[in-house]
Amino acid sequence: MSAGRKEPQKDAACQRGAVVFPSNPLMGDVESVWSPLHDAAYNGRILALRKLLAQVNSSTIDGQTALTEACSWGHVTCVSLLLQHGATPWGTGLSGSPIHSAAAKGHAECIDPLVECGADVDQHIDVLGSPLQVACSSRRLGAAKTLLRLGASVNRSVCGDPPLHIAARLSSPELLSVLLDHGADRFLLNWEGKRPLELSPPGSGAEELLRQAGGVFPLMQLCRIHIRRTVGKQRLGGIRDLHLPTELIHYLLFQSDPRGALMP
């Protein structure tokens, strides 16, 4: 097993149970090339991580970096530290990326710092799709909300089902509601030529929600969607600096409902 000097203390925010060291010369190729940097990120060992940042973008055979591992386990303090020291926010491999890992595991708190440092909320990976598709497939409502708030395209689908179709197949009214609020097209056809309603289980809450959804959005919602699309995902953060009423800024950033009540 990979070993090292025992850390005198550990960052409480990065601890997740007992420390694990996957690196072992008797293991397979992927595990055996793990560096101490991967071990530290995997286990949330912040002090060890500080000593190893010179290897910040080293990766395993399948392209997993220390940043990917930290995102996968929700070690947000480690994520921030790695990014501050030059970790590549979009990853180095074709099989995964930090933002996909955070979306798949539902670690929404890791997505914000990734995007702030240049990660693309619509980054496409052939075997996975977009981060939003991954979040929906994994039923990660919080991650899906965060991605949409940060400007992820709700109807984008380079391969596989669009997000709304995924939520319909999974019969998830919560995901469907969030996607529809962000402008998902319930008449959009997937690669099979089917609409979301045709994929929802008969008699399910998802089917009922899609049937009840009107063909036209309320005017306030249409204005919000249009303004956000016009601003563009790269500049959404700048909405906070506009000379607008606070309530309107919260609404444009999906931080409040039409009545002005702040959303969780």
Image (cartoon, helix red, strand yellow):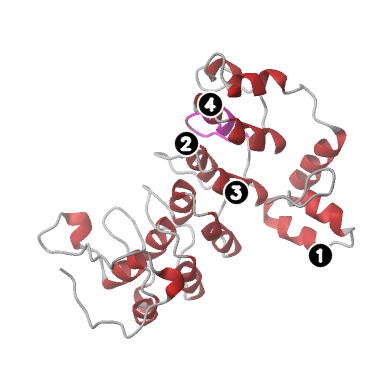
The numbered mark at residue 147 is 3
> Residue 122's spot in the image, x, y percent?
56, 46
Marks 4 and 3 sit apart, C-alpha to C-alpha, by 20 Å
Report if the CB atoms under discs 1 and 3 are less than 8 Å apart: no
- Placement of 111 over or under 94, stated as above or below: below
How many other residues sit within 10 Å of disc 1, few (<14), some (14-19) or many (≥20)?
Answer: few
Q: Secondary structure at mark 3?
A: helix
The numbered mark at residue 171 is 4
- Where on the picture, by quarter, is residue 6? bottom left
How many other residues sit within 10 Å of disc 2, few (<14), some (14-19) or many (≥20)?
Answer: some
- Tell me the amino acid under the disc marked 2: Ser
> Residue 264's spot in the image, x, y percent?
67, 51
Q: Residue furthest front?
A: 17
Along the viewing direction, whichever of 7 and 26 lies nearer the viewer: 7
Q: Residue at x 28, y 59 (%)?
A: 60
Marks 1 and 3 sit apart, C-alpha to C-alpha, by 21 Å
Q: What's the magenta region?
A: 155-166
Q: Which residue is mark 2?
A: 137
Is 245 displayed left or right of 87 in the figure? right
Q: Secondary structure at mark 1?
A: helix
